[in-house]
Image (cartoon, rainbow, N blue to C red):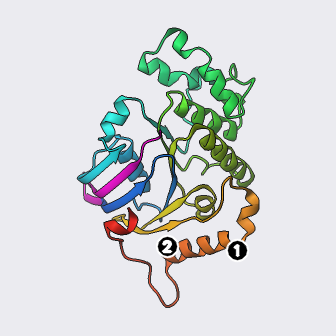
Amino acid sequence: MSQSLSARYVGKVFDGRGRVVALRDVNMEVPGGGFAAIIGPSGCGKSTLLRIFADLLQPTTGTVAIGGGAPQNARRTKSIGFVFQSATLLPWRTIRRNVELPLDVAGERGRSREGRADALLSLVGLDGFGDSLPHQLSGGMQQRAAIARALILKPEILLLDEPFGALDEITRQRMNLELLRIWGETKTTAVLVTHSIAEAVLMADRVFVMTPRPGTIAKAVDVPLERPRTLQMMRTPAFFDVVNELRDALFGTETEPALEPLPLEAVS
């Protein structure tokens, strides 16, 4: 069973040339096997929050739990997969060897790893490209390989930091559907950071809206669309209702300012 993820009053301060309060009192809950999206203005701390979930950064205040335990426990047990905006593939390794990289780092050898990379390449639609080098693949295909690499250790949490932000709109929508298919097959708990309101609504069960820095959760909106999701759903009144609710939360309305941070009980 996939693990849940939660944040309780998480804050992050960076002390360098100047003190930057990146996050303040972030509260959110993602159930095991759920798909959540985080949206907000540039610089609001979305990526910082994702890196705290991944145990790549430590919170200054508050706590994060994965499956009820500390994120470092999930990292040590290889329960977290991370996909960045750039595919970050090693140019001298074949696609198969790039996908196998986490196995090399984890020291997994022998029969336990046989066929896992090829099975994942098939899952993400890259059959026949295992021996190719990254520069021989399109941007969308490289991101498919990055997703396969993130899944090779069978993580229970999949964190995605604007993985399709650099792609053209047609490729991006195709990749959205591919990611939903992969998520449906792997049953992983997923958290997607995106600047696109429409992408967040298409993908997620729940969308968390962050305020400008210091970032905190202003609103949590449930998405009442059935699964499996399709591009045709993006034309429905239900889809537009959620998009408009999120847009109002981000930008406010003519008569109502953008929302203040929510208390913990409202986002749990």
Whole-percent x, y for residue 100 in the image: 55, 21
Q: Is residue 218 above or below residue 116?
A: below
In the drawing, does residue 245 fall left or right of residue 18? right
Q: Residue at position x 37%, y 34% from top?
A: 75
Q: Residue at position x 69%, y 48% from top?
A: 177
Q: Nearer the viewer, mark 2 or mark 1?
A: 1
SS class of the residue under badge 2? helix
> Which callout, 2 or 1, points at the residue further toward the start of the chain?
1
Q: Is residue 248 above or below residue 4?
A: below
Q: Main secondary structure of the magenta part?
A: strand
Q: Determine the CA span between mark 2 and mark 1.
A: 20 Å
Q: Which residue occupies the extreme bottom position in the image?
A: 255
Residue ID for mark 1: 237
In the drawing, does residue 74 fall left or right of residue 164? left
* Circle on res. 250: 2
Asked where in the image residue 68 lies, by quadrant, the reply is top left
- Crowd rating for badge 2 (residues with CA inside 10 Å; few <14, some 14–19, many 20+): many
- Judge by depth and name the residue closer to the eye, 198 or 91: 198
Asked where in the image residue 203 lies, by quadrant, the reply is bottom right
Q: Residue at position x 51%, y 22% from top?
A: 101
Q: Is residue 255 above or below residue 245?
A: below
Q: How many marks?
A: 2
Whole-percent x, y for residue 142 in the image: 64, 35
Whole-percent x, y for residue 248 in the image: 53, 78
The C terminus sits in image quarter:
bottom left
Res. 52 in view: yes
SS class of the residue under badge 1? helix
Q: Residue at position x 68%, y 22% from top?
A: 130
> Label 1 amino acid?
Pro
